[in-house]
Structure formats: C-alpha cells, structure tokens
C-alpha cells in the first residue's frame, strides 16, 4: 500500500490562498488506510480550514468536500463533473498519483497536493507504517529470504552486510535493524545460507527508464477476426 | 458566530445518512423476555443519564400499570439479561421503581374519548381485566368490568400481601381506569354469558384468574385448622384477622407459600415451618423472597411432605415423610420420591396449603375447558369456542404472573377491536431481530466487572411488625450507577456504508472488546451480539463507514451543537465555552450541573454517550461556532469502560496541533478525566473557564488596538 502524510495546515493554507472555491478531495483507498486522506481526514481538514478562516477574519474561501473510492482511475472521477464546474481548485488528499490523475482529467483546473506521498509499506501496528518496497522493478527477494535490502538497508547494498553493522544494528541509525543481519538470520532458519555466499552483480538503475509503464494485457493477433468484426 | 452546516460540502454526507434513517438496533434479550416487550434498554439508559422524566415516558408507553410491576414483577428480563454472563443482571425492576417514585407517577389520566358504540364486558378485574379495559378505552370502546369481590385488582388485591404491594399504589393505578371512563361493577359475580349478551355487550373477555386451591389429597385435609393459602391471604387482605395459634405449617414451595408464611409471621405467629418436598434448588419461589422469609424467621423443612393430618385437642398432628430426589420429570425438576419408613409426626396449630391453584369456570359460561381446568383459547386471537368470547390471564394459563396477565389483557383488547371491526387479526410483526448468542470469553474479559447495586430494604426486625413495604427506593446516585452497568445490547456499531469500508482494520485494532473480525472472504464484520456500543471505532474509522445503530446516538452531538448555536446567539454572555461531558457519571449525577449558574454562565454542555465518542471534528466544529474554549470531561476510572481516556487525549492532542497552526492558543482546549488524584474536577473546570475568559479578553483588546 502507498503511505503518505498530510501536509501541515500552514502549507495547505498557503497553497489555497489564491483560490476562492476549494474542493477538498479524499481518496477511499490507500490514503484512507494510512490515515492521511480518507473521509475522516477530509472532514477534519475541512473543519480546520473553516476554523482558521473564521478565527483569522480574513480569507473568503468556500469549501466543499468529497471522497472518491479511488483517485487513480479516471472512471472514478466521473462523479465529480457536476461539482468541478463550481470550484477554483481541487485540494487532493490522494497520493501523488491521484493528484496527477485529476490534473490530467481536468486540464483547466489547478490541482494542489494535500499530502506528501512517502513510500510503499505495511502497517506495523495501529497508525504506524514501515517502508518495505522501493518499486525497483527487478525484485530479488527470492535471494534475500523475503527481506528487501534495497529498501531496508540504509545503503541499499546488494552484497551485505557492510563493515558498519554492529550488534545487529545499522551504523547509520542505531535504532534500526541491519537488513543484512536480518537476511542472514532468516536464511539460516531456512537452511539456505549458501545464498549468502553468492555474489550479486551490481545493478544499473540508470538502465531502468522512467516513467515506466506496465500492462497486464496480453496482445494477441486478432488476424481475420478483427476484419470480421470490422 | 458562523453558519454551521450549509454549503454543498456536507450534502454528500447528509445524503448518505438519509439513506438509512431507520433504527437499526436489535431487540435486547431483556425486552425479548418481557411479556409486555417493554423498552427496557431505553429506559435504563435514560435513567443512567439522569433523564428520569423521559425514562418514565418510555415506561408508561409500554405498560398500563408500571407502578404495580415495579413492585411485584417477577422480572424474567433480569434472568435473560446478558450482564448475567459478566457478573450479575441489571436490577431492572428496582430501577423502574426508582424512575416511577422519583419522576412522580401520580399522573392524571385524561378521560378517553368514546369513538365506537360496541360495548365490551370484562369478567374479572385482575391485571388481565384491568389492562384490557385500559386499552379498550384507549381504542375508544365503552368497557364495563364485572368483579365478584367488593374491590378491584384480583390477586393484586386479594393475593399479593401489602408489604410487597402497598394498597395506595394499586389504588392510584385503578383510579386511572375510572378517570378514563371505564364502568365498574363490583360485587357482581357473572354466572352466565348469555345474560351479558342480552344486556347488549358485543364482546366478552373472561379473566377470572385461578383461585381454586388444589387439594393435597391426604387424610384429614378437611380438619378444622387446615386452610388453603389463597383463602388465607384473601381473608387477611380483606381485613380479617384469622386466628392461627402459635405454630403454623405452610405446605408448598412457590411464591404463595412464601407469602403465606411471611403474612403469618406478621400476624404474630411464633413459629412458621414451610414444608417443601424438593430441595432449595428446585424451589420455584423468588430466591430473594425466600431469603427475606428466612431472615424474618421462617424455617424451611426441605424434602418433607405431609401424608396424614389428625385433629387432636384443638391441635393438628401432621405425619410427614422424608423424600429423596429421583430423575427429572416433565417440568425438568427432579422428582421427589418418599423414603421408606421415614415417617415422623409434627404438631401445629394451623396448616396452610399452598401447592397451587386452578381456575374455576362457571359451567354456564359454556366455554371449553382443558387441562388443569384452564379455559381453552386460540393463542393468537385469544378466542374461545364461543363467538365474541375471549379469555386470558391465569384463567387460561393457570397460575402465572402479573406481566403475563397484563400482556394477555393488552392482546385481548386489540383482538376484540379486530373482531368488532370485522378485521382479519392484525398480527404485529417485529421487523427488528433480537440479539442472540452469548458473549465471547474475550469480550467478557474486557468488560469492567461492576457488582449489582441493590435498593435498600427494611431490616427484618422492623418489617415483621407490620405490613409496610419491605423494599425501599434507590438513592439518585446509586440508581444511576446501577443503570450505567447496562451493556446496551444490540445498539452497537455497524458498518453502514460497506462500499466505503477500505478494510483498513482500524476498528479491529482499536476495539477494546475484540469485537470486529475479518471473515474468510476478507470482509470486516462487527457482530451485533458482541459490540459494547462504546463508539470508539465509529470515531476512529478513517472512512467514516461505521455508525451506531440507534439514530439518536448517531445524530445527537451534531444536533446538540446546532441547538447551542441557536441558543447562544441569543445570549449576551461572553465568552462562549462548550463542554462535551459524559452524560452518565458526571453529568447525570450533577457534578457539572453548577456550570449553568455562577461563574460558568456562558458555558454550554453537550452530554455525550461516552467521551470516547467525541470526534476531533466535533471539537473543531465547536470552535468554528465561535467557542472561545472547549473542554471534554469524562469519568475515567469510574467509567463502565476501560481506556476511554486514551482516545480522548489523542483526539484532543490532534486538534491542539491544528489550533496552534491556526494561531489559537492550544490551552483553549482541555480534557478533564476524573481519577483518584483529580477529585475536584469542578474546581479545575472553573479555573479553565477563567483562563479562557482571560484569553478572550486579551484577544478583544488586541483586536481593538489593531483597528
Ligand atoms: C399470593 C400470590 C402472590 C403472587 N405474587 C406475584 C408476584 O409477586 N408477581 C407476579 O407477577 N405475580 C404474582 N402472583 C400471580 C399474579 O397475581 C396472577 O398471575 C395475576 O394476578 C393473574 O391475573 P388475572 O387477571 O388473570 O387474574 P386474577 O388476578 O386472579 O383476577 C381474577 C379476578 O376475577 C374475579 N372473578 C372470578 N370469577 C368471577 C366471576 N364469575 N365474575 C366476576 N368476577 C370474577 C376474581 O374475583 C378476581 O378478582 C401472585 C399470586 C398470588 C396468589
Ligand atoms: S445489559 Fe442492558 S440491554 Fe442487555 S439485557 Fe441487560 S438490561 Fe437489557
Ligand atoms: S463500538 Fe466499541 S465495542 Fe463496538 S465494535 Fe466499535 S469499538 Fe468495539
């Protein structure tokens, strides 16, 4: 899941200054789960902005709110078409992808990001998330016992541990577990320690072009069928 | 002051809420067990909030004679109460009595309007007859009660002793009927129904009770000095003072036996022995009353039955046999079996038999009578074999209870209405389901154990002297604390908007009672029979997908805020301070009541179900309305729930951070949670109010300087 953090109220207030009518737009998927931009946070932000406006005595914004099931698919945005004509900006509490989806769909409308999209991760406990994947595009978890050194090793090295590991912790951050010690221990448990002894060639990140595109569609040659359907 | 909810903003939410404007709560076990289906959970909850008058309204609307039930109901609701699984049931009957006594149940009943011309006759004035008359009058029928005795009430008058049901109480309830315009004919024993039809009655309800005492079938049963329980109690209740001698035996183990024994003691008898053929466990009488009888000095000889009675020199020589318990019989109780050669003799002055009663229906009624001499009816329509003749109460069921009789009377009234209006009987179908299933061990473990609080009773020494009511009334605070123990079964949380649920698992993680779970298909379920209605998950759900099942719980904070907004606009007192307070402990018992007066003027209280239910949004909205300060006051360690303070503090901190960024002093928001170390909460709140007033003054001055 994508994890994000809501921007500070101060920053949000600064961003919306030029716009009179602001639609605060939540996202019902990842942003709801990570407490950054679901309906509850939309409503909280909405209320906070109103209080701020009321108390400061200046500012003449009118706010509206809505939470979509998901911002990153254009079809979900269809329900907005009525509301969107009445607003000057959309303050999106979707992740960076959501913000861009809206920008693409409404070319004439300024879109503002309400959250800082941070990483892909999982919940450790209520309200705590840890990064787990860097979306590198070349997964090596099979060799590293299901623990990602790219994300969880501060240095992201593929042939660890480095000399800085001490008592299972990382030299760069003594509170953090050394990813490579974790990998070692788990390989030991799985009786696959030979994987430690292998050398993994460096990866050329520059060889992975950005932006990436993926498809799960299988292209088939429709040949004559295509012509039949004409 | 700024407008609250107007723009398009909240329309979406409003529409969502409109989608389900119905009460989704389930029927709690107590209500399901009550023959009258009284809304127990609702009135107990209102008592817990200190809203006694409203509790009284709920009680009245479900029971024509609540004061009577408040004294003598056998409270099947308490046996069914789910709190039994945690510690002990809620003292429902005593709480009802508290509400009635405190709220003053001496309401005058307005005369009911007669809208139908068909006269209805009611034969018998026990609770079944009285209830039927009450509801028939409400429906607009002229109703006449025929009663063989000189006074109304049936067993309420001639059976139940006064120390359990004071006659003034009965009198007040009976008067209600006269005020409603029910015609009453006492000292009129009906012997033939044809006569009533001849007199122009279009329908008849037979509710003659079960007054014929059963015979023991042993030698010497008719000796002078042997009397049956029903007759004995009737004589005492009608003011006679039967002479009993010094030593009395009572045979039987039911409520009538216990009542007879305690009545005998009050008449000055030295020794009372209750002879019961089974053991205490099988005794059908109410355990509390058995205890009270023992306290008053009655002795119970268990596993003993009389086999022969001989009158000797004005005394009775009673031969008894000892019993042992065999296999359970049809009633589920273990069958007593006489032990060979265990006979022994006992001398008494009087022997009272109380082994049960049966109805005695005059043959000229020509209604068919079945097992145990009971009148046979169709249970849905209460019709007998005769056209236009209905029957109910003890006469149909055999000796039962007051509430069952009241329920039969109410049902009869509506069936008679159907009959007279030539309608197919309208069977009211309950659309809501009942709470079923037991609480899970992990849920029980997390429910704070709070023992049941009983109302005070007179000490045995005092109560033996006369027939004064034995049970006294709760103190205000004790009653409220007892009512707070209610688990509010079936009014908990539900995922109303399944489409919004992101399956984030927040509810599963925050619930203190381990209620929500993931089912095999990966959907979150909140089982309605486990939820404790604390509301924590409702406030924490990031998708706002969860609501409480009761409409009132869902809306009431917002509605209260709207109300304050309107009222405060008219008030000139500044600054406006809004407090969200636990509607039970603090608010209900009046600790905060003082805030309306004195230095706290300008302070408005929003009573909440539990402070854990106050959402960060509610607090912000209070500020938006123009509140200069907001506080939350909860009962902490006194709370029926664990850990509510944690949630309050977290939300307060969240809002405080927002306030700081807006340029408002975070001290304007404060939480007060009662604990052992924070006894003087009212004082702390006072100084908070002063502090806010200071901040307000400072801001007014800065404003003026600026302009
Ligand atoms: C000693 C005792 C204690 C009890 N304690 C409790 C208790 O604590 N809680 C509880 O819930 N229940 C208790 N009960 C049971 C309860 O009182 C009865 O179940 C209830 O009163 C039955 O109501 P009813 O209207 O069917 O009949 P009844 O109350 O028996 O009333 C029948 C009436 O019909 C009259 N009648 C009979 N024949 C005729 C006729 N031919 N013409 C005119 N009138 C006639 C009778 O005089 C009587 O007034 C107790 C019963 C007894 C005897
Ligand atoms: S806990 Fe409350 S709602 Fe539940 S059965 Fe008992 S009295 Fe009724
Ligand atoms: S309302 Fe309270 S008890 Fe019920 S599911 Fe939610 S958190 Fe659990």
Image (cartoon, rainbow, N blue to C red):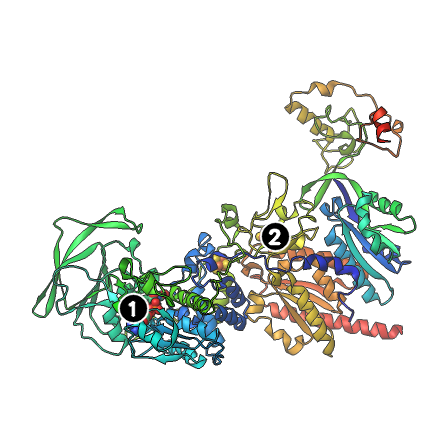
The answer to which quarter of the image holds residue B558 is bottom right
Q: Which residue is mark 1?
A: B365
Label 1 C-beta lies within 8 Å of the nearest ligand 1 atom: no
> Which label is found at residue B331?
none
Left or right placement of residue B383 versus residue A155 in this view: left
In which quadrant of the rendered image does the N terminus of chain B lie? bottom right
Front: mark 2 or 1: 1
Q: Nearer the viewer, residue B222 or A178?
A: B222
Location of residue B350 with respect to B507 vertically, above or below: below
Q: Nearer the viewer, residue A113 or B100?
A: B100
Picture residue at 62% right of the left edge, 39% below the top: B521
Label 2 C-beta lies within 8 Å of the nearest ligand 3 atom: no
Q: Nearer the viewer, residue B639 or B106?
A: B106
Left or right placement of residue B591 versus residue B349 in this view: right
Element type at marker 2?
A: strand
Q: Position of residue B478 (x, y in %)?
A: 47, 67
Q: Position of residue B302 (x, y in %)?
A: 23, 56
Element type at marker 1?
A: helix
The answer to which quarter of the image holds residue B250 is bottom left
Picture residue at 82% right of the left edge, 21% below the top: A201
Label 2 and label 1: CA atoms lie apart by: 54 Å
In which quadrant of the rendered image does the C terminus of chain B lie? bottom right
Determine if residue B621 is in view. yes
Q: Which residue is mark 2?
A: B494
Determine if residue B158 is in view. no
Location of residue A201 with respect to B462 vertically, above or below: above
Q: Nearer the viewer, residue B305 or A153?
A: B305
The chain to which mark 2 is attached is: B
Q: Earlier in the sequence, mark 2 or mark 1?
A: 1
Left or right placement of residue B366 versus residue B320 in this view: right
Q: Position of residue B688 (x, y in %)?
A: 68, 69
Neighbours of disc 2 within 10 Å: few (<14), some (14-19), many (20+): many
């Amino acid at each position: 899941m994508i994890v994000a953090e809501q921007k500070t109220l101060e920053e949000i207030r600064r961003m919306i200054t030029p716009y009179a009518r602001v639609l605060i737009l939540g996202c019902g998927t990842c942003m709801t789960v990570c407490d950054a931009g679901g309906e509850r946070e939309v409503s909280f932000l909405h209320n906070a902005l109103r209080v701020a406006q009321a108390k400061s005595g200046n500012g003449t914004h009118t706010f509206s709110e809505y939470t979509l099931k998901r911002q990153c698919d254009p079809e979900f945005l269809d329900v907005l078409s009525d509301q969107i004509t009445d607003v000057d900006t959309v303050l999106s509490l979707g992740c960076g992808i959501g913000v861009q989806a809206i920008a693409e769909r409404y070319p004439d409308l300024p879109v503002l990001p309400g959250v800082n999209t941070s990483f892909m991760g999982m919940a450790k406990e209520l309200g705590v998330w840890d990064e787990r994947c860097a979306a590198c595009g070349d997964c090596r978890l099979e060799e590293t016992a299901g623990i990602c050194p790219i994300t969880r090793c501060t240095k992201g090295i593929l042939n660890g541990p480095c000399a800085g590991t001490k008592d299972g912790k990382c030299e760069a951050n003594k509170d953090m577990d050394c990813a490579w010690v974790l990998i070692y221990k788990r390989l030991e448990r799985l009786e696959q320690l030979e994987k430690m002894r292998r050398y993994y060639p460096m990866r050329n990140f520059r060889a992975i072009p950005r932006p990436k595109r993926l498809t799960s569609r299988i292209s088939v040659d429709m040949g004559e069928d295509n012509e039949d359907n004409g | 002051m700024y407008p609250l909810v107007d723009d398009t903003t909240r329309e979406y939410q409003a529409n969502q809420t409109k989608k389900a404007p119905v009460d989704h709560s389930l029927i709690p076990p107590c209500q399901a067990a009550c023959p009258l289906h009284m809304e127990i959970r609702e009135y107990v909850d209102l008592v817990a909030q200190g809203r006694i008058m409203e509790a009284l309204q709920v009680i009245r609307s479900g029971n024509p004679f609540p004061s009577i039930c408040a004294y003598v109901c056998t409270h099947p609701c308490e046996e069914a109460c789910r709190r039994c699984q945690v510690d002990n049931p809620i003292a429902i009957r005593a709480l009802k009595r508290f509400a009635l006594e405190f709220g003053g149940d001496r309401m005058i009943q307005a005369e009911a309007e007669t809208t139908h011309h068909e006269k209805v006759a009611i034969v018998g004035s026990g609770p079944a007859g009285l209830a039927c008359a009450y509801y028939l009058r409400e429906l607009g029928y002229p109703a006449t009660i025929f009663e063989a005795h000189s006074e109304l009430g049936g067993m309420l008058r001639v059976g139940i002793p006064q120390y359990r049901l004071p006659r003034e109480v009965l009198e007040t309830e009976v008067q209600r009927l006269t005020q409603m315009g029910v015609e009453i004919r006492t000292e009129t024993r009906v012997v033939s129904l044809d006569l009533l039809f001849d007199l122009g009655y279009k329908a008849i309800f037979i509710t003659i009770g079960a007054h014929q005492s059963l015979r023991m079938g042993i030698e010497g049963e008719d000796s002078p000095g042997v009397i049956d329980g029903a007759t004995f109690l009737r004589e005492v209740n009608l003011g006679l003072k039967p002479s009993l001698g010094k030593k009395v035996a009572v045979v039987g183990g039911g409520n009538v036996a216990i009542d007879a024994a305690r009545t005998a003691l009050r008449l000055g008898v030295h020794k009372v022995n209750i002879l019961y053929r089974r053991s205490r466990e099988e005794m059908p009488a109410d355990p509390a009353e058995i205890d009270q009888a023992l306290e008053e000095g009655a002795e119970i000889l268990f596993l003993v039955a009389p086999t022969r009675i001989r009158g000797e020199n004005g005394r009775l020589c009673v031969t008894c046999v000892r019993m042992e318990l065999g296999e359970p019989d049809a009633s589920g109780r273990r069958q007593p079996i006489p032990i060979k050669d265990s006979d022994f003799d006992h001398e008494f002055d009087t022997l009272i038999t109380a082994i049960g009663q049966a109805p005695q229906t005059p043959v000229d009624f020509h209604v068919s009578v079945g097992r145990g001499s009971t009148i046979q009816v169709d249970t849905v329509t209460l019709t007998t074999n005769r056209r236009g003749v209905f029957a109910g109460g003890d006469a149909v069921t055999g000796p039962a209870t007051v509430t069952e009789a009241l329920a039969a009377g109410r049902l009869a009234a509506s069936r008679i209405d159907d009959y007279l209006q030539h309608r197919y009987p309208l069977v009211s179908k309950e659309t809501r389901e009942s709470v079923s299933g037991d609480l899970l061990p992990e849920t029980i473990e997390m429910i704070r154990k709070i023992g049941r609080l009983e109302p005070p009773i007179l000490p045995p020494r005092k109560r033996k002297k006369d027939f004064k009511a034995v049970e006294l009334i709760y103190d205000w605070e004790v009653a409220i604390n007892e009512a707070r123990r209610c688990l509010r079964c079936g009014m908990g949380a539900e995922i109303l908007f399944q489409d919004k649920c992101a399956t984030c698992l927040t509810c599963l993680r925050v619930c203190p009672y381990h209620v929500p779970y993931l089912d095999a298909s990966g959907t979150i379920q909140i089982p309605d029979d486990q939820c404790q209605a604390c509301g924590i998950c409702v406030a924490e759900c990031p998708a706002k997908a969860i609501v409480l099942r009761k409409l009132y719980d869902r809306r009431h904070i917002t509605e209260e805020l709207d109300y304050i907004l309107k009222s405060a606009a008219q008030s000139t007192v500044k600054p406006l301070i809004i407090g969200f307070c636990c509607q039970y402990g603090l608010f209900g018992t009046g600790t905060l009541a003082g805030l309306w007066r004195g230095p706290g003027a300008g302070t408005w209280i929003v009573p909440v179900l539990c402070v854990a239910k106050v959402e960060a949004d509610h607090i912000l909205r209070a500020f938006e309305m123009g509140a200069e300060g907001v506080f939350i006051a909860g009962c902490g360690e006194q709370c029926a729930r664990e850990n509510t303070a944690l949630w309050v503090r977290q939300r307060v901190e969240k809002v405080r951070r927002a306030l700081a960024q807006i340029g408002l002093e975070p001290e304007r928001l404060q939480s007060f949670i009662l604990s052992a170390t924070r006894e003087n909460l009212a004082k702390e709140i006072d100084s908070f109010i002063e502090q806010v007033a200071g901040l307000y003054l400072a801001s007014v001055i800065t404003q003026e300087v600026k302009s």
